[in-house]
Amino acid sequence: MNYINLPRQYNFVLNSINMIRPLFFSVVFLHALFTYSQTSVRIVCMGNSITQGAINDDKVIVEKTYRPWLWEKLDSAGIDVDMVGYHQFFMGEQEKGFATVPFTSRYTGKTFDRDHDAYYGITSDGLLNGSSVPAWTNAPLPKLSERLKNYDPDIALLHIGTNDADADVDKTEANIKEIIDVLREKNPKITIFLAKLTTFWKPINPRVRRIVREKSTEMSPVIFVDQEIGYDQEKYQFHPNDLGGQFMAQKWYNAIVKHLKSITSTKQNSDVASLIHVYPTYSKGSLTIENANNSEISVYNVNGSLVKELKANESAQQNIDLAELENGMYLLKIIKEGSLSTKTFIIEK
């Protein structure tokens, strides 16, 4: 694109912006991590029977899954969690007409929040695209995009692929990626925790980290949770018993709490970053930085390469000379008290 009707310096600025657009695209979203409701964190547990669980004729949860244990851990930790999803059933419950399955927190006395989006025997394709066969909830299962009209999660826990054919691992990978995309259509800021399956022999497991790397963004992180390591099939059973459910719950809990703490830290330090100012944005290389005392300063070029590192002194106002740098647009990254501030500036001599 040419800007032939603009003054020379503006042509330079606009062309520089076009050159650096890919680099700064992620910077725009660097602090766009979603914020949770002050009243609750909405979590959906997604998957197959390992997530759904089952009950018997005595209304006992015989395959407890991790869901009750995870809910209890979060609730007892003081996290106001709202488990969301398309339905509340355990496998077998709908046929037997059971209205409730009692599970009360041993620590708070609250009743288990049963909502989820998991289905006995379902594949990744079924979780994504639904099924016309009446099952699970005694009705055809709508596709995920339709089910999401009934709930809006902040966090999705995804443990899927156990029932997929091993020969269709490429399809399983594609389905998981599309599930992530559909969840983001509902909530662009959703955080997705993607599990390496407890069923260690499934060929999708070696691909989970790659999916996480490829699909994670600053605005909508995809976080790896290793449910495989340490899961003893003989001790915990294929469909988790109490010990298995508690094992899985602990893995999910650790990952969720770590993530929530990181977001809380970002929120607490956001005021620090907002006070940092850099000027002028267009110069021959002389910059003034305010309120960046005792900070670490890094300068990156349009290719994303580090070109200079500085350590700010105790003064509230810093003057730095970058005249040795070539003409172009640069990114200034300032870290102070654990808070990140990013600024752009242009050098033209």
Image (tube, rainbow, N blue to C red):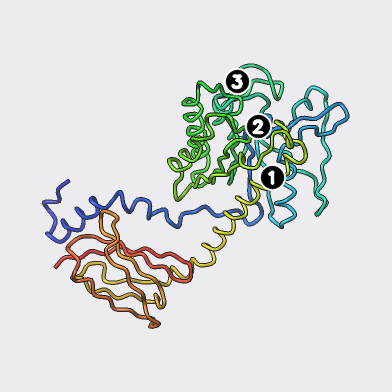
**Mark 1 vs mark 3, CA separation in Å:** 28 Å
Displayed quadrant of residue 320: bottom left
Q: Identify the residue under disc 3.
A: 131
Residue 214: give x, y in percent of width and height.
43, 40
Displayed quadrant of residue 58: top right
Number of residues whose C-alpha sits closer than 10 Å to that of mark 3, classed few (under 14), some (14–19) or many (20 or more): some
**Mark 1 vs mark 2, CA separation in Å:** 16 Å
* The disc label shown at residue 118, or none: 2
Question: How many numbered marks have been drawn onto this rendered protein structure?
Answer: 3
Residue 217: give x, y in percent of width and height.
44, 47
Q: Earlier in the sequence, mark 1 or mark 2?
A: 2
Q: Earlier in the sequence, mark 1 or mark 3?
A: 3
Q: Residue at x 58, y 30 (%)?
A: 201
Q: Residue at x 32, y 65 (%)?
A: 332
Please, what is the three-letter code of the amino acid marked with disc 2? Ala
* The disc label shown at residue 93, or none: none
**Horizontal side of residue 95 vs 141, given as left or right:** right
Asked whether the residues under the numbered discs 1 and 3 touch, taking CB atoms below 8 Å apart as contact, a structural biologist would say no
Q: Identify the residue under disc 1.
A: 249
